[in-house]
């Protein structure tokens, strides 16, 4: 079943139920109704039974089905009526009624209405039947509407209110039907209406035109009757209307007009009604209000026809507002009348509420730009039409002005009409006494205080009084509401006018651009400039006329009102709105070329930004300087404006007005005669207006034209008052207290000043977007201001630099079109530069130089160096500055040159000789400041621009740099000038090929010139280098030490790095005319230098350290540097210099200088000489560079090639900072190895004579410097650094003299080494040089000496046999060094003390800490002996015996050694060399060389094992055990290396060793008390080791015969010693135990006892196993003699001892049995 069928079924069921209920309800009292209901039930059943589609059948029979319900409503019974209406509504809602049935329902509703029954149900049914469908039309519809109207006028409020809403809904339904009908016929055009015929028929009959469709006909008749009812006429269509109120009718008319404008605009018939019925009706109803004048009529009731009614007027204005807003296109003429009426309502003779209502309507209109445009186009532009738009604006202005001029009258009229009494009087008092402003925005003028209220929501007008539909009387107007609405309307007018002109101008611009696509605009202009120049010339004249009319019609009223509001405004936001509006209008006027209004608005802004009296005087004086333009009489318009906006004299001085509070106080600018002399006070509003002026000029500068002068004059005065002073680049900054002493600025404004300064800068930065004409206007105005400032400065008045600064700022941002402004700006600035006033002149020079720098640096097209004319124009002002005599201008000029070179020096193609000439001339007595400035430029030239200048200018650059080096004004400049020469040398080297070719070409053209002092011809390129070297050599002997040092470093680094560029003949000149003369000069000057402090040195610019505080010390540094430099040159270029014939002479001469310097009394010079010596010994293999700088594959002996190609050193890094001779840093580890040892040196360079000379010089230096002094007076002791450097030289030198190194040389060498090591140090320096006793580090000297000996040792080891005979001498020297561990060597007659006593003042000299040195020598000796023990020379010279003798010292001293490490190391070395040396000594072939060694060895053992120096008490147990382990190792060595080989060892030595072992095994005898439990002197492990050794060699395991006799003797010795040792221990133990009583003996005694008993057990077992002939009777007697002592020990309580004792006693078992054989003397006898 479909959804429609379900609905139909449910409807049928409900209808049957309703009919049954109706039948039951009426069966008694109303039989006809009962019968009709039953007939209806049968009818429904019949319909359902005979029709498949039930709903259409029900509609067809709806009259019969409806009849019972109609009859029920006629019964007047409420219950029945309710039941029937419910059923009828059900039929209606299901659209089950036909048109006839619907008409019957309407009639039923009419009857119920007349009966006054169920009004609400009736209304509900009416709404349902009209909204469900459109079956109700024509008269039935009219009847239904009348029912609703009549119920609206019911006395019941509920019914009336409900009916009111339903009436409005029903009327809307009628018109919605029209819209639906129109949509259904949207494709078809409406029938053209004959308005004349329609007008004729309407006067005769009120029938609807036949051209309308049904729904439109109903709507037409309904609207027509509404107009009639409002007009008081009888309706034509709505029959039965008994009454109608005018207010309700107007509401209905407004609702229809507002909601359905499509109907009236589409159908001409409805439009006709608007014109013929509505508009006359409105005009008629307005007549009482128009005729009524406030204060002229007598009091009357509010609804009197003669008196305006608030409800009627308010609703009329709402209708008028709708007509204007929505039907303006239909009612142009009528709207003119309406607008004129509204403007009349704004007049002052009307009631205040009338004016407010009209104002709210105007507010709505003013917010719609399209309407305003139409008003202006339709009325103001017509020749004989009312100037509606102008009248509206003027009315707004007049209304606002009236609120301030007649505030009491306005409010009294408002209060007297509406709410007289207390409220009126209170309002009056408020107006008369301006209260203190609250936090809300407000206006205050001449004592009148008016608050500002919000009247818009999200920018949309929100009327208040037009919405008071429920009010019958005019309410009171809130204070300030009228002004707020008027202010908002005024702002909307400005916004709309600006939007119209701007948007349409944009559209025109796009259209014109589209037409001119092929034209390429290259000029950079702002959008405003493009619009003015590109649009107005081609725009449609009608559009342009419209824009101009919009502005002309409104600007006067807007300006007058805004000026008044601006003067009265107390709120920052409102002030901002006003200023923005004035700015917008000024820009519009400028765009349209309307100079009069533009200047008027600019004048208003300028006036508002300055204090009143100050503004009048300043602006009046400024006006004559502004020319006439476009027929505009500025004076007239401005004076009129000032009169119109005058009011500052009467302005209320409310102290609570935040906007009028003084925020800054400054001095007036003395540029105008008559300007007030007192302080000038600025308010916050003045500052805000200043920002508005800045915004106007920034955003709309193109349209200002001649107004620029007015704007800039105002800004200049404001800047002066605020104390802003020009800064670099033309920007402004806050002046300090000295610059603006009379300026007082609040904190808030002080924080805002940087923002204002930035805005000013952005203003002039935006001038780059101005067109050429506008830019000329701006520059002309600035020049006029500047001229005025110059005139004031001539009178010794402080000038304003605003114009000069902004001329600079404007020029800087307009570089792309400098040809437009350059000449006028530069000419004016040059005039300023000649001004006598210093500040004025300085800023003129600043502007000129800044513009020149910016212009030269700008990227021109074509480039600047190609446009000579432009370059001449730009550099002209800078050149003209030279003619100005003022020194500060000269300084500015030099600074500009420097900055030009810094930024754009590459564009100076042909000006380098001139630039260098200017810079060079500055260096000659021009003062320090100018010297510094010129030198900065020279630095830039050398650093960045050498490749650009011609080649002949290079020599000029060297000369200029040398001049700066020799000048005496500033030593720092001299030093830096030397660095510049170094940079020039680098450039010459890197571009050698290009420069060489270029110089040769120029030399041919100009003629060759030789450097001074050079006779033989030199190539131009070499001559350039010689000039550079000569200039540096001159600087090397300058009177200032810092300059000498820098020049010397540069000279030698340059020669070392770039010498490959010189030919061999040039090298001869360098060597003999530059280097050696320099050495001689330095030697001579240093020798004659003063040793006292120089007063001039003390006064110098550089702080001098005490090491440089005399001329002698300073020249010593120069001598060091020079000698090191020459040595480095020799080392670097030795391969080239060897080709010179006189090289040996040069070599010898250099060595003489080195030797003399090394023996100098100056430590610095002597040490540096050694470093130079070291430098020349380090030879590296050469490599060859050809002329192109590439490696040459082969070495040629051709002289010609040698002249062209020099062998150059390896790659190097030049260090010109550190003062040392070793400046070359190698780049690889292999090269460092060659540097140290000289490996890889060219064999042909190893000349014996050269190196012999070097060896002789080294020895002379060494022996003379280290010779011990013979007296204690005038002692000169070499420093450790000197000695270290001296010894460090030897390894490198030894490489070359090794083949000729003999024993005599070794002796000399050892003498030097021994003397050097023995040299002490001063006591006050010892803490920095000598390591402490506890440290193990060697001093640098000691390490170097040992390294040198190691080098010699290795050479001897690898050398021939004749050379290996030097081993004993090496051992002797090393062993001599070993003895230093226990006793430091002496140095001549100098008294020294050891380091531990260095703190005392008894001696000035301290001996070195030789412990680490001696220990390292001992290690080297041990290692060397292990390698050379079998060498014949070593054996023959008793090296091992010598070692043992030396070791006796530390081993004997043991704990008395200065360092514990010494005797420990000696023990370790003994343990290392004995295993190597003893086998050699035992060899029969070598034994004769070691005969005297054995006693020394025994002595070593005895001295060490039983030292006379006990361990210190502070020794810990762990340390004692560690030391004891060394003793055990020595015993172990005896056990392993000596006793097993006793047959090869002297008997006396063996016996001495056994005695030592026996002595070592007895540790109980050393105990002073048997109760000493903490005896730390006991060496238990050592004693145990000795005892075990005795025990080991006491065992008899074989027959002692033949070759074993020696072993037997050793065994007997061991047995006797062992048994004696056991007896002593047992006896001592028994005695001590008896004495101790119950106190137990120490643990060590128990352990010893246990060990002895175990040894007795083991020994007896060994004796039993041995053959009896091997054991003599004495031994047995000793064994048996132990028995009593063993028995005595049985009283021991120790379980450990008892157990061992038991085992020992068991061994006597066999001895207690009678023997079977008798033993005699150890032999068996039967």
Image: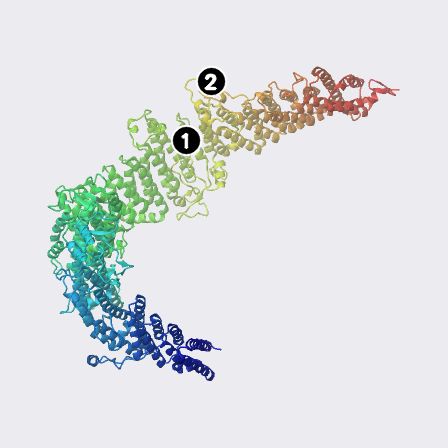
Q: Measuring from the top left, give residue 1188's x and y in whole percent.
A: 39, 49
The residue labelled by disc 1 is 1168
Q: Nearer the viewer, residue 457 or 1235?
A: 457
Q: Earlier in the sequence, mark 1 or mark 2?
A: 1
Q: Residue furthest front?
A: 28
Nearer to the camera, 1314 or 1005: 1314
Q: Eyeballing the image, is 68 above or below 906?
A: below
Other residues around mark 2 within 10 Å, as few (<14) / some (14–19) / many (≥20): few
Name the one closer to the observer, 1603 or 562: 562
Residue 1095 figure quarter: top left
426 displayed left or right of 1199: left
Q: In the rendered view, would you say 1378 is above or below 42?
A: above
| Tally of numbered discs | 2
- Which of the numbered marks, if any, corresponds to residue 915? none
Q: Secondary structure at mark 2?
A: loop
Question: How far apart are labels 1 and 2 at the CA level?
Answer: 28 Å
Q: Which residue is mark 2?
A: 1389
| Viewer-closest of 770 and 1017 | 770
Against 1397, residue 717 (above or below) is below
Q: Position of residue 615 (x, y in %)?
A: 15, 49
Percent position of residue 995, x then y: 33, 48
- Determine crowd level at label 1: few under 14, some 14-19, many 20+ residues with C-alpha closer than 10 A: many
Residue 811, percent across and down?
Answer: 22, 52
Q: Is residue 119 left or right of residue 1134?
A: left
Indicate the secondary structure of the residue bearing disc 1. Answer: helix
Quarter of the image holding residue 502?
A: bottom left
Q: Residue furthest right?
A: 1726
Question: Split into 4 quadrants, where in the image is the C terminus?
Answer: top right
Determine if residue 601 is in view.
Answer: no
Residue at the far bottom in the pictured view: 50
Q: Describe residue 1339's horizontal placement relative to residue 1120 as left or right.
A: right
């Amino acid at each position: 079943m479909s959804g429609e069928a379900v609905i139909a079924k449910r409807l049928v069921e409900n209808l049957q139920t309703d009919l049954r209920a109706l039948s039951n309800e009426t069966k008694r009292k109303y039989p006809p109704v009962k019968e009709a209901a039953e007939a209806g039930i049968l009818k429904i059943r019949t319909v359902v039974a005979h029709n498949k589609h039930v709903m259409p059948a029900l509609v067809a029979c709806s009259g019969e089905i409806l009849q019972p319900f109609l009859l029920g409503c006629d019964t007047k019974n409420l219950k029945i009526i309710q039941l029937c209406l419910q059923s009828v509504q059900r039929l209606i809602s299901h659209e089950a009624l036909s048109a006839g049935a619907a008409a019957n329902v309407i009639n039923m509703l009419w009857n119920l209405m007349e009966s006054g029954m169920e009004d609400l149900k009736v209304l509900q049914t009416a709404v349902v039947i009209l909204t469900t469908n459109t079956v109700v039309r024509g008269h039935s519809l009219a009847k239904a509407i009348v029912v609703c109207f009549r119920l609206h006028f019911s006395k019941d409020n509920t019914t009336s209110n409900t009916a009111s809403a339903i009436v409005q809904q029903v009327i809307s339904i009628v018109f919605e039907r029209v819209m639906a009908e129109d949509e259904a016929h949207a494709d078809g055009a409406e029938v053209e209406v004959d308005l004349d015929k329609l007008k004729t028929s309407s006067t005769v009959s009120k029938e609807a035109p036949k051209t309308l469709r049904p729904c439109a006909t109903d709507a037409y008749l309904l609207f027509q009757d509404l107009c009639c009812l409002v007009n008081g006429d009888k309706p034509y269509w709505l029959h039965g209307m008994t009454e109608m109120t005018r207010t309700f009718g107007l509401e209905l008319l407004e609702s229809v007009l507002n909601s359905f404008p499509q109907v009236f605009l589409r159908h001409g018939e409805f439009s006709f009604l608007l014109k013929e019925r509505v508009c006359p009706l409105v005009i008629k109803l307005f007549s009482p209000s128009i005729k009524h004048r406030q204060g002229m009529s007598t009091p009357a009731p509010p609804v009197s026809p003669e008196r305006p009614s608030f409800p009627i007027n308010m609703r009329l204005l709402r209708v008028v507002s709708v007509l204007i807003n929505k039907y303006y296109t239909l009612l142009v003429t009528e709207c003119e009348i309406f607008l004129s009426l509204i403007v009349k309502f704004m007049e002052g003779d009307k009631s205040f509420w009338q004016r407010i209502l009209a104002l709210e309507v105007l507010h709505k209109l003013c917010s719609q730009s399209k309407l305003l445009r139409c008003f202006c186009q339709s009325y103001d532009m017509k020749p004989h039409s009312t100037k509606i738009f102008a009248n509206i604006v003027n009315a707004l202005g007049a209304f606002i002005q009236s609120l301030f001029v007649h505030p009491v009258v306005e409010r009294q009229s408002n209060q007297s009409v509406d709410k007289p009494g207390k409220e009126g009087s209170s309002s009056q008092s408020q107006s008369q006494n301006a209260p203190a402003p609250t936090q809300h925005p407000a206006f205050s003028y001449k004592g009148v205080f008016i608050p500002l209220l919000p009247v818009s929501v999200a920018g949309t007008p929100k009327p208040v009084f037009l919405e008071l539909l429920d009010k019958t009387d005019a309410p009171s107007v809130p204070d300030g509401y009228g002004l707020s609405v008027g202010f908002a309307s005024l702002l909307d007018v400005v916004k709309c006018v600006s939007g119209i002109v701007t948007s349409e101008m944009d559209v025109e611009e796009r259209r014109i651009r589209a037409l001119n696509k092929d034209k390429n605009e290259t000029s950079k202009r702002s959008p405003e400039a493009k619009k003015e120049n590109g649009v107005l010339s081609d725009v449609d004249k009608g559009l342009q006329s419209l824009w101009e009319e919009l502005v002309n019609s409104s600007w006067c009223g807007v300006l007058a009102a805004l000026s008044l509001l601006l003067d009265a405004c107390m709120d920052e936001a409102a002030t901002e709105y006003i200023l923005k509006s004035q700015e917008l209008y000024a820009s519009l006027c400028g765009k349209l070329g309307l100079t009069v209004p533009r200047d008027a608005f600019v004048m208003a802004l300028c006036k508002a930004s300055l204090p009143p009296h100050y503004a009048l005087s300043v602006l009046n004086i400024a006006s004559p300087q502004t020319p006439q333009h476009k027929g505009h009489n500025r004076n007239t318009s401005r004076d009129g404006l000032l009169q119109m906006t005058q009011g500052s004299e009467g302005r209320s001085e409310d102290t609570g007005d935040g906007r009028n509070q003084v925020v800054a106080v400054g001095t007036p600018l003395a540029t105008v005669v008559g300007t007030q002399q007192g302080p000038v006070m600025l308010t916050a509003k003045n500052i805000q207006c200043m920002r508005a002026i800045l915004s106007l000029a920034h955003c709309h500068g193109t349209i200002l034209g001649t107004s620029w002068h007015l704007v800039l004059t105002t800004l200049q005065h404001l800047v002066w008052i605020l104390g802003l002073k020009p800064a670099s680049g033309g920007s402004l900054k806050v002046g300090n207290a000295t610059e603006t002493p009379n300026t007082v600025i609040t904190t808030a404004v002080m924080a805002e000043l940087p923002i204002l300064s930035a805005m000013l800068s952005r203003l002039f930065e935006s001038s780059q977007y101005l067109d050429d004409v506008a830019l000329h206007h701006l520059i002309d105005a600035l020049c006029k201001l500047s001229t005025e400032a110059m005139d004031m400065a001539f009178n010794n008045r402080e000038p304003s630099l605003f114009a000069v600064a902004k001329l600079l700022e404007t020029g800087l941002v307009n570089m792309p079109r400098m040809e437009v402004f350059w000449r006028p700006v530069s000419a004016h600035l040059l005039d300023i530069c000649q001004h006598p006033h210093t500040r004025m002149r300085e800023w003129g020079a600043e502007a000129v130089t800044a513009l020149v720098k910016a212009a030269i640096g700008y990227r021109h097209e074509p480039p600047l160096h190609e446009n000579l004319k432009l370059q001449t124009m730009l550099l002209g002002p800078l050149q003209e500055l030279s003619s100005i005599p003022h020194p500060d201008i000269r300084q500015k000029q030099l600074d500009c040159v420097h900055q030009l070179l810094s930024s754009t020096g590459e564009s100076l193609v042909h000006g380098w000789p001139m630039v260098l000439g200017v810079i060079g001339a500055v260096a000659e007595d021009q003062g320090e400041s100018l010297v510094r400035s010129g030198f900065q430029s020279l630095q830039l030239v050398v650093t960045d621009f050498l490749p650009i200048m011609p080649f002949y200018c290079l020599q000029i650059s060297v000369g200029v740099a040398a001049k700066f080096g020799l000048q005496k004004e500033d030593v720092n400049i001299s030093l830096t000038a030397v660095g510049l020469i170094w940079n020039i040398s680098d450039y010459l080297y890197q571009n050698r090929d290009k420069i060489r070719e270029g110089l040769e070409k120029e030399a041919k053209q100009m003629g060759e010139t030789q450097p001074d002092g050079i006779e033989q011809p030199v190539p131009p390129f070499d001559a350039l280098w010689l000039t550079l070297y000569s200039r540096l050599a001159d600087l090397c002997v300058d009177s200032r030490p810092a300059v000498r040092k820098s020049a010397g470093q540069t000279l030698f680094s340059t020669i070392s790095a770039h010498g490959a560029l010189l030919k061999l003949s040039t090298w001869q000149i360098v060597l003999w005319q530059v280097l050696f003369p320099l050495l001689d000069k330095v030697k001579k000057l240093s020798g004659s230098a003063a040793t006292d402090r120089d007063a001039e040195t003390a006064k110098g610019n550089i702080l001098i350290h005490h090491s440089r505080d005399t001329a002698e010390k300073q020249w010593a540094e120069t001598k060091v540097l020079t000698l090191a430099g020459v040595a480095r040159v020799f080392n670097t270029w030795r391969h080239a210099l060897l080709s010179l014939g006189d090289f040996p002479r040069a070599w010898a001469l250099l060595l003489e200088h080195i030797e003399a310097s090394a023996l100098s009394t100056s430590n610095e010079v002597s040490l540096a000489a050694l470093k130079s010596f070291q430098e020349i010994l380090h030879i590296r293999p050469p490599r060859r560079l050809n002329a192109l700088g590439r490696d040459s594959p082969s070495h040629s002996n051709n002289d010609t090639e040698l002249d062209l190609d020099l062998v150059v050193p390896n790659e190097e890094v030049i260090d010109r900072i550190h003062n040392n001779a070793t400046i070359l840093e190698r780049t690889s580890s292999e090269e460092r190895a060659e540097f140290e040892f000289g490996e890889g040196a060219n064999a042909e360079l190893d000349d014996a004579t050269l190196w012999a000379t070097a060896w002789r010089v080294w020895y002379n230096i060494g022996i003379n410097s280290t010779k011990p002094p013979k007296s204690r007076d005038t002692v000169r002791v070499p420093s450790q650094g000197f000695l270290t450097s001296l010894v460090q030289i030897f390894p490198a030198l030894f490489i070359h003299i090794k083949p000729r190194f003999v024993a005599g040389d070794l002796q000399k060498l050892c003498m030097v080494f021994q003397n050097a090591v023995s040299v002490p140090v001063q006591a006050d320096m010892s803490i920095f040089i000598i390591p402490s006793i506890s440290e193990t580090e060697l001093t640098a000297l000691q390490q170097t000496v040992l390294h040198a000996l190691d080098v010699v040792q290795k050479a001897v080891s690898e050398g021939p046999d004749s050379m290996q005979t030097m081993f004993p001498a090496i051992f002797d020297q090393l062993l001599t060094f070993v003895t230093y561990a226990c006793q430091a060597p002496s140095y001549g007659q100098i008294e020294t003390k050891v380091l531990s006593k260095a703190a005392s003042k008894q001696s000035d000299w301290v001996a070195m800490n030789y412990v680490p040195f001696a220990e390292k020598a001992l290690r080297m000796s041990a290692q060397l002996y292990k390698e050379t023990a079998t060498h014949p020379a070593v054996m023959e010279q008793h090296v091992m015996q010598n070692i043992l003798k030396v070791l006796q010292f530390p081993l004997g001293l043991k704990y008395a050694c200065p360092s514990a490490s010494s005797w420990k190391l000696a023990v370790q070395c003994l343990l290392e060399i004995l295993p190597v040396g003893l086998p050699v000594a035992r060899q029969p072939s070598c034994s004769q060389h070691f005969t005297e060694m054995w006693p020394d060895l025994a002595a070593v053992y005895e001295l060490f094992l039983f030292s006379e120096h006990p361990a210190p008490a502070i020794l810990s147990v762990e340390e004692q055990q560690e030391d004891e382990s060394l003793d055990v190792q020595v015993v172990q060595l005896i056990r392993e290396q000596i006793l097993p080989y006793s047959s090869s060892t002297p008997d006396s030595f063996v016996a001495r060793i056994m005695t030592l072992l026996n002595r070592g095994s007895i540790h109980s005898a050393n105990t002073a008390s048997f109760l000493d439990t903490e005896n730390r002197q006991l060496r238990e492990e050592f004693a145990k080791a000795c005892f075990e050794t005795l025990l080991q060699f006491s065992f008899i395991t074989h027959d002692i015969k033949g070759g074993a006799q020696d072993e037997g003797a050793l065994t007997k010795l061991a047995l006797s010693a062992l048994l004696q040792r056991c007896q002593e221990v047992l006896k001592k133990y028994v005695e001590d135990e008896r004495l101790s009583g119950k106190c137990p003996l120490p643990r060590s005694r128990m352990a010893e006892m246990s060990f002895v008993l175990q040894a007795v057990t083991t020994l007896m077992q060994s004796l039993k196993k041995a053959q009896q002939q091997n054991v003599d009777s004495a031994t047995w007697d000793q064994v048996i003699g132990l028995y009593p002592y063993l028995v005595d020990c049985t009283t021991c309580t120790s379980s450990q001892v008892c157990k061992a004792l038991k085992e020992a006693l068991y061994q006597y078992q066999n001895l207690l049995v009678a023997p079977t054989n008798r033993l005699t003397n150890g032999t068996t006898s039967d």
